[in-house]
Image (spheres, rainbow, N blue to C red):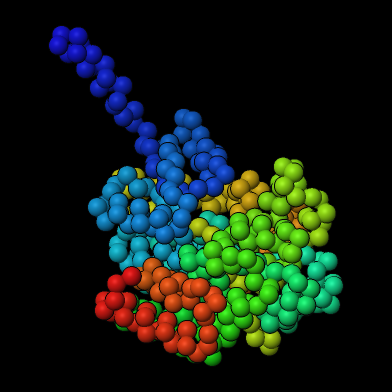
């Protein structure tokens, strides 16, 4: 007991705060790029330190973990990397600390148009676009040439692509498992056809499901026609990003919609011996295909926004950290280091970025013109309703599937049905 009594003051002294605040930054998993940015923005001896807390891989699990902690008013969440579709829900619940009007321009000037839309709720800037993302149409040059199609042509459609793949016995790789990636695909098809999955979102649970429409029918025809065609990869209904990439790089690979990381990943596969340089040299890229020939596509929008926790004890330090992380130089560094596209337009003119991403101008234009997923505090209910009623793709038909989705979603939002 005497020894313990003597040791206690030493332990307390070791655990005392040295006066430098430590910010907890909850991040989505990456290749360490966010941690390296934190080291740059919080060097030793600086006014604050940063501890990285890594969330699960799955976006829905990230949301769940953060919601539970913030609902308990957890003050240890100083900063979070937040998937844009969840911003409205968190802000509506009072979980985010809004940025002041005087700081608004700092986080919006020079940022591409689509990411900015996801950072506001009720007229307030509640998150700062950190990096953005979009999907491109990737194609095997040899397959496109054999089919006599040009995927870079402005009017290139899903219907043309399906027919070209069938003619050459090739596959079109998509993300069609029952997860958030499937919602990304369905939403892109609907907004590209001029519609919305849900409207009147400011009404919250009284928002209006709007899949039963010409746009919803057009999206259903794309999904169902592909799933029931010979252009559908084996196990298409279980495919996520990596399964799609594997199918695209196979002998039957023809076309794929996926995020820009796939180009660097294919090059890495060459070094690992998993594919050949000939496959990489055969990869071309184009804008996301159209649903309606006369209507430009609205590519998917992804990425990460930075948000300050409402209960942080260090709001000033957290604000300073966000300013550093979202600077143009940080945007360039993160895009080159982590392979995730920047939210700031000027980053795409940097020589390092152009070298790492030969398709940088296309990525920038696609992000700027992208169609965000529904901005609603009930996004999780909306997304899950779509995933359930549209899966598997072989069962999707117009107009039945869009009509079923509206009915199902309406019941979920009103509390008459549990997910």
**Residue 390 in picture, x, y percent from top left:** 48, 76
**Residue 245 in picture, x, y percent from top left:** 66, 59
Q: Is residue 404 left or right of residue 221?
A: left
Q: Is residue 88 left or right of residue 276?
A: left
**Residue 330 in picture, x, y percent from top left:** 58, 48
Q: Nearer the viewer, residue 15 or 215?
A: 215
Quarter of the figure with the N terminus: top left
Q: Nearer the viewer, residue 99 or 392?
A: 392
Rendered residue at 52%/37% (across/down): 39
Q: Is residue 152 left or right of residue 115?
A: right
Find residue 292 and report its image quarter.
bottom right
**Residue 347 in picture, x, y percent from top left:** 66, 56
Q: Nearer the viewer, residue 342 or 376?
A: 376
Q: Is residue 230 left or right of residue 282?
A: left
Q: Nearer the viewer, residue 52 or 119?
A: 52
Asked whether residue 385 is in view, the answer is yes
Rendered residue at 68%/75% (across/down): 230
């Amino acid at each position: 007991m005497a020894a313990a009594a003597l040791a206690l003051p030493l332990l307390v002294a070791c655990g005392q705060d040295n006066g430098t605040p430590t910010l907890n930054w909850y991040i989505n998993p990456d290749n360490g790029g966010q941690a390296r940015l934190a080291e740059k923005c919080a060097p030793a001896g600086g006014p604050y330190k940063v501890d990285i807390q890594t969330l699960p891989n799955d976006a829905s699990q990230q949301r769940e973990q953060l919601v539970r902690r913030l609902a308990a008013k957890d003050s240890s969440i100083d900063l979070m990397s937040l998937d844009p579709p969840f911003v409205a829900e968190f802000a509506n619940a009072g979980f985010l600390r809004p940025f002041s009007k005087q700081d608004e321009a700092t986080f919006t000037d020079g940022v591409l148009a689509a990411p900015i839309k996801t950072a506001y709720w009720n007229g307030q800037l509640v998150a700062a676009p950190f990096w953005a993302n979009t999907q491109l149409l990737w194609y095997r040059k040899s397959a496109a040439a054999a089919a006599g199609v040009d995927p870079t042509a402005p009017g290139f459609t899903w219907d043309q692509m399906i027919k070209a793949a069938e003619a050459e016995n090739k596959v079109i790789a998509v993300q069609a498992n029952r997860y958030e990636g499937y919602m990304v695909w369905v939403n892109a098809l609907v907004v590209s056809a001029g519609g919305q999955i849900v409207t009147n979102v400011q009404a919250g649970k009284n928002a209006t499901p709007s899949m039963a429409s010409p746009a919803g029918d057009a999206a259903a025809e794309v999904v169902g026609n592909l799933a029931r065609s010979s252009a559908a990869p084996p196990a298409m209904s279980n495919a996520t990003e990596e399964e799609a990439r594997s199918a695209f790089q196979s002998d039957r690979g023809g076309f794929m919609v996926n995020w820009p990381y796939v180009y660097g990943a294919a090059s890495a596969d060459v070094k690992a011996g998993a594919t050949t340089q000939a496959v990489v040299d055969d990869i071309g890229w184009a804008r996301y295909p159209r649903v309606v020939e006369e209507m430009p596509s609205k590519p998917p929008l992804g990425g990460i926004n930075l948000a300050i926790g409402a209960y942080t004890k260090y709001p000033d330090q957290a604000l300073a950290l966000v300013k550093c992380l979202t600077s143009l130089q940080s945007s360039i560094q993160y895009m080159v280091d982590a392979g995730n596209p920047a939210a700031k337009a000027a980053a795409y003119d940097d020589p390092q970025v152009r070298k790492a991403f030969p398709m940088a101008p296309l990525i920038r234009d696609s992000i700027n013109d992208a169609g965000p997923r529904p901005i609603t505090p009930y996004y999780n209910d909306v997304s899950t309703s779509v995933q359930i009623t549209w899966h598997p793709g072989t069962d999707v038909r117009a107009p039945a599937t869009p009509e079923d989705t509206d009915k199902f979603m309406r019941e979920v939002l009103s509390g008459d049905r549990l997910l």
